[in-house]
Image (cartoon, rainbow, N blue to C red):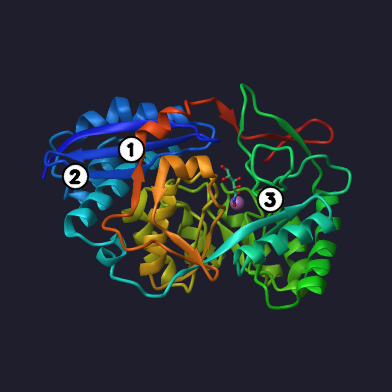
Amino acid sequence: MKIAHADVLVTSPGRNFVTLRITTDDGVTGLGDATLNGRELAVVSYLRDHVAPLLVGRDAHQIEDTWQYLYRGAYWRRGPVTMTAIAAVDVALWDIKAKVAGLPLYQLLGGASRTGALAYGHASGFDLEALFDSIREHLALGYRAVRIQTGVPGLDQVYGVATSTGIGQRYDYEPAQPRAYPSEEEWDTRAYLRHLPSVFEAVRNEFGPELPLLHDGHHRMTPIQAAQLGKALEPYDLFWLEDCTPAENPEALRPVRQHTTTPLAIGEIFNSVVDYRTLIGEQLIDYVRSAITHAGGITAMRRLLDFAAQYQIKSGMHGPTDVSPVGMAAALHLDLAIHNFGIQEYMRHSPATLEVFRTSYTFSGGLLHPGNNPGIGVDYDEDAAARFPYEPAYLPVSRLTDGTVHDW
Ligand code: EZ4
Ligand code: CO
């Protein structure tokens, strides 16, 4: 079964998505997500100009060999653009293999280890009232775990907080805005650190001790600030504190770990198992945040999560709306199959997105399931996609109150 062609598809049903479609000589198609938020066309070029021509004529069944060929064969290894492109090829080939086998992909990964994948949603609000409304709305939708993001007194716009006038739906935060330049947001870490524990106290008082609560620090703290926050949040029993420090420096989590028992999650901007060697080997984290889409596909994520399992570290795959329904479906197959599953992030995609991507995954009783269609279970509607042409979009940039560029 040879690869006949590989097409790169770009569409923007509310936000940009890049999809690789591989077609075999006997007409089987597979899809892979290649969406890198705010840098979409770099991956398009990588795939269209440098990868697609190499795929034609290769055996579609040789997933491992193709992965190594693209990784080692490029000489220039790792990096978000490269690993997103490799992931798209890898997922598309797994989709094909499972379709040919007539099985949902999770069956080829060892079969189901659970009935469904516990999902968490994004509750947010500028003040407590709006936040409580958002939490209630998520509970009504069936969520059994929620991430809490809130405004900070003195700041107009804060990461993770939905606005009624923004591009996203009321409570689903969409940070990438279609515009020619990134927007700029003001940030003040001390004001944030003073405010956040009171928010968690109020949420626990209102919603009780049982509901799993998560929070994303989005890379903004120094190690000692992160240690202070982790300690201050201990009474509120977080499921995890995510990305408390910038991602490049794994050693930063040593002091955080020494000072707090709040569980730590990191890795949504990592793209390789290499990024995790210190973090996993020294047991500095509790959850691995990479997405299949950005970390080399199912082949690479399986290896990473098997490594993590040796240290009782679990999965918590990244699942914002910038991971397309193809990337989400791939994640759900792996979530269902692996032993060390932790939780799956799940921001629902917009109705327009779901017109282009016809999914078969389900969300019920707080659990996601990939469905039982052969392959990963997503179809791409090209006519619908054509109605939503590409629009340049950027994530915001963060500045401290004196104008210094900060981590966003
Ligand atoms: O900011 O996906 O945990 N989720 C996140 C996301 C990221 C965006 C960046 O593309 O941190 O909201
Ligand atoms: Co995050």
Residue kind at label 1, given as amino acid type: Leu
Q: How crowded is mark 2: few (under 14 residues within 10 Å), some or many (20 or more)?
A: some
Q: Residue 20 carries which label?
A: 1
Are the residues flagged by discs 2 and 3 in contact, CB closer than 8 Å? no
Q: Position of residue 373 (x, y in %)?
A: 30, 59
The reply to whether the residue tagged 2 has its Cβ within 8 angstroms of ligand 1 is no
* Residue 377 lies in quadrant: bottom left
Q: Residues within 10 Å of mark 1 (few under 14, many from 20)?
A: many
Q: Where is residue 29 in the image (x, y as percent from the top left)?
A: 23, 43
Q: Is residue 224 visible?
A: no
Q: Residue at x 72, y 51 (%)?
A: 221
Label 2 residue SS:
loop
Q: Which mark is residue 28?
A: 2
Q: Which mark is residue 171?
A: 3
Q: Which residue is drawn at 17% across and 59% down?
A: 101
Left or right: 310 as drawn, with respect to 57: right
- Of residues 403 and 127, the one nearer the viewer is 127
Residue 102 lies, with reference to residue 172, above or below; the image says below
Q: Where is residue 151 in the image (x, y as percent from the top left)?
A: 80, 49
Q: Earlier in the sequence, mark 1 or mark 2?
A: 1
